Image (cartoon, rainbow, N blue to C red):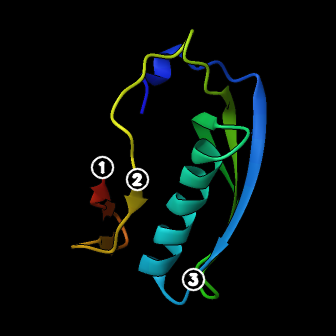
């Protein structure tokens, strides 16, 4: 999408997402940030701060810190069209937390 080293953290956008399980929560979480980038204000987050994370009810609230995409300032990379469930994996063990997501470009 762009080189995030060119993105300043001068604005913030808050998202909320929920799901039926950890995979659907991850999907909706990523999809919310993709929507912010794909529609006005074309916001791209350089840093994401998790405000609340309810593992039992599969809800999350997060704040993205960044700025609107500006073609004059940010190099244009590959467009992400969608987040997918294809081969999505969530490992949430005591000392190991990993996610694997395939995106549609």
Other-residue count near label 1 (Cα within 10 Å), few / some / many at <14 / 14–19 / ≥20: few
Q: Earlier in the sequence, mark 1 or mark 3?
A: 3
Q: Which mark is residue 9?
A: none
**Residue named by callout 3:** 19
Q: Secondary structure at mark 1?
A: loop
Q: Report whether 95 appears left or right of 6.
A: left
Q: In the image, what residue occupies the spot 78% across and 29% down?
A: 11
Residue 42 in the image: above or below residue 14 = above
Q: In the image, what residue occupies the spot 52% across and 14% down?
A: 6
Q: Secondary structure at mark 3?
A: loop
Residue 26: x and y in percent read: 48, 69
Residue 23 in the image: above or below residue 76 = below
Q: In the image, what residue occupies the spot 72% across and 42% down?
A: 40
Q: Secondary structure at mark 2?
A: loop
Say which quarter of the image contains residue 42.
Answer: top right
Looking at the image, which residue sits at the far left?
87
Alpha-carbon span between mark 2 and mark 1: 5 Å
Q: Earlier in the sequence, mark 3 or mark 2?
A: 3
Residue 21 in the image: above or below residue 62 = below
Viewer-side residue, 96 vs 27: 27
Other-residue count near label 3 (Cα within 10 Å), few / some / many at <14 / 14–19 / ≥20: some
Other-residue count near label 2 (Cα within 10 Å), few / some / many at <14 / 14–19 / ≥20: few
Say which quarter of the image contains residue 86.
Answer: bottom left
Alpha-carbon span between mark 1 and mark 3: 24 Å
Proximity of marks 2 and 1: CB atoms separated by less than 8 Å = yes
**Residue named by callout 1:** 105
Nearer to us: label 1 or label 3? 1
**Residue named by callout 2:** 81
Q: Give the position of the N terminus as an image quadrant.
A: top left
Looking at the image, which residue sits at the far top?
72
Viewer-side residue, 53 vs 71: 71
Residue 35 visible in the shown view? yes
């Amino acid at each position: 999408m762009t080189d995030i080293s060119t993105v300043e953290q001068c604005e913030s956008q808050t998202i909320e997402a929920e799901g039926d399980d950890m995979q659907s929560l991850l999907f909706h979480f990523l999809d919310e940030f993709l929507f912010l980038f794909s529609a006005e204000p074309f916001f791209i987050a350089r840093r994401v701060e998790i405000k609340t994370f309810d593992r039992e009810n599969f809800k999350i609230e997060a704040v993205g810190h960044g700025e609107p995409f500006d073609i004059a300032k940010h190099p244009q990379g590959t467009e992400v069209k969608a987040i997918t469930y294809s081969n999505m994996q969530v490992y949430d063990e005591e000392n190991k937390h990993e996610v694997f997501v395939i995106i549609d470009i």
